[in-house]
């Protein structure tokens, strides 16, 4: 991306990037595939498709490999691949937030280079991650969204390398493509939101981001284009989805007001696998926060593909 503001590219990524036009998302209830193209200086959504998965075929967790029914998931992926025209040698792979762990880390000493920064982060986080530090795939970025170790505080994403390799090997063995770019859900939903923020000149305002998935809820807060809060929690399914989501949102709003001296969110960008309109109404009624539902496609059904399309579209120069 030419624009280096927060969210415009979220330069953080789980793997070194290539920017293919086809993306695949594996969730606990389905596999999704999206394809885009660039024509006449604009990005077009060419293909949106999904196939459901039975319960238990994929278990979203940061603690172990996620794909339980490997043959079944591979067959679903082959079915989706057969229905799309584009078959590039590399695809984008979007993982769920709960596949990884994200921390804000303070560095007392300044590393000399990227390798030293990674080693320092690995050492500092060794007591916080539930697997051996040498098995941790680590990426980091500043609160501005830029990958650079010249900062006292860094946002750090940690994923078990065996978990990541299982997804990448599934792509490779099933459709014969490499994973050119791998990244998480909420950060790419935020990338998609950034075009709206730029167009409306909202960069100096405070925003809440809500990603309500079947298995987890992730929340993020930006103040003046800087990430100041992020949390992802597993859904416990002890009550209705909207009620449980609000039980997570309320303390985040209180933290924003009490600890971050927040004076009010201009709006919330909301993504939900279901009940998005109800969640928006509840946010307005409970916290007086107006919501935006992003839809980068040509019809209402494209809403569910928003984070995947954010992964595909936001790195393109034509997106800014």
Image (cartoon, rainbow, N blue to C red):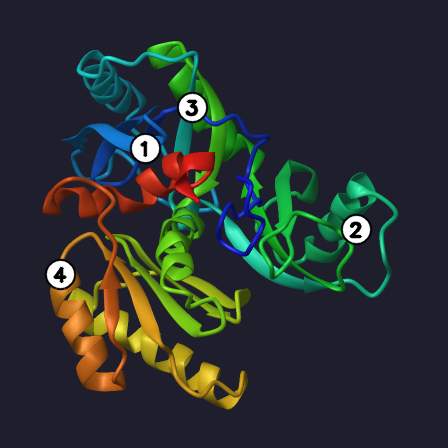
Q: Is residue 127 above or below residue 203?
A: above
Q: Are marks 2 and 1 in contact (CB under 8 Å)?
A: no
| Residue shown at the point (40%, 70%) measured from the top left | 207
Q: Compare marks 4 and 2 and give the one earlier in the sequence.
A: 2
Q: Compare marks 4 and 1 and give the one earlier in the sequence.
A: 1
Q: Which residue is mark 2?
A: 120
Q: Are marks 4 and 1 in contact (CB under 8 Å)?
A: no
Query: In the image, which disc is placed on residue 43?
Result: 1
The image quadrant that residue 32 belongs to is top left
Point out residue 81 in the picture as x, y percentages from the top left corner. Answer: 25, 16
Q: Secondary structure at mark 4?
A: loop
Q: Compare marks 2 and 1 and give the one earlier in the sequence.
A: 1
User: Alpha-carbon distance for marks 2 and 3?
Assistant: 32 Å
Between circles 3 and 1, the one closer to the viewer is 1
Q: Is residue 243 above or below residue 45?
A: below
Q: Secondary structure at mark 2?
A: helix
Q: Which residue is mark 3?
A: 20
Q: Which residue is mark 4?
A: 275
């Amino acid at each position: 991306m030419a624009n280096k503001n927060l969210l415009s590219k979220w330069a953080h990524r789980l793997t070194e990037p290539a920017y293919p036009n086809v993306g695949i998302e594996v969730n606990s209830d389905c596999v999704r595939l999206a394809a885009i193209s660039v024509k006449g200086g604009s990005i077009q959504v060419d293909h949106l498709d999904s196939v459901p998965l039975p319960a238990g075929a994929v278990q979203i967790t940061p603690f172990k490999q996620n794909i339980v029914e490997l043959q079944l998931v591979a067959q679903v992926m082959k079915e989706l691949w057969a229905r799309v025209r584009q078959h590039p040698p590399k695809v984008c792979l979007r993982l769920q937030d709960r596949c990884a762990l994200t921390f804000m880390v303070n560095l007392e000493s300044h590393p000399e280079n990227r390798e030293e920064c990674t080693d320092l982060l690995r050492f500092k986080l060794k007591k916080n991650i539930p697997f051996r530090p040498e098995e941790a795939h680590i990426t980091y970025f500043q609160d501005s969204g830029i990958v650079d170790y010249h900062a006292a505080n860094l946002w750090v994403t940690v994923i078990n390398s065996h978990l990541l390799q299982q997804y990448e090997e599934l792509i490779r063995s099933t459709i014969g493509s490499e994973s050119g770019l791998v990244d998480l859900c909420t950060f790419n939903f935020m990338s998609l939101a950034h075009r709206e923020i730029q167009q409306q000149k909202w960069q100096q305002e405070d925003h809440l981001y809500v990603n309500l998935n079947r298995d987890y809820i992730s929340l993020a807060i930006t103040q003046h284009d800087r990430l100041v809060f992020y949390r992802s929690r597993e859904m416990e399914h002890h009550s209705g989805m909207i009620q449980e989501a609000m039980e997570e949102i309320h303390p985040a709003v209180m933290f924003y007001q009490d600890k971050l001296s927040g004076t009010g969110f201009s709006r919330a960008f909301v993504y939900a696998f279901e009940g998005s309109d109800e969640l928006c109404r509840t946010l307005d009624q409970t916290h007086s926060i107006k919501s935006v539902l992003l839809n980068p496609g040509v019809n209402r059904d494209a809403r569910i593909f928003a984070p995947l399309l954010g992964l595909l579209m936001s790195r393109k120069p034509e997106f800014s």
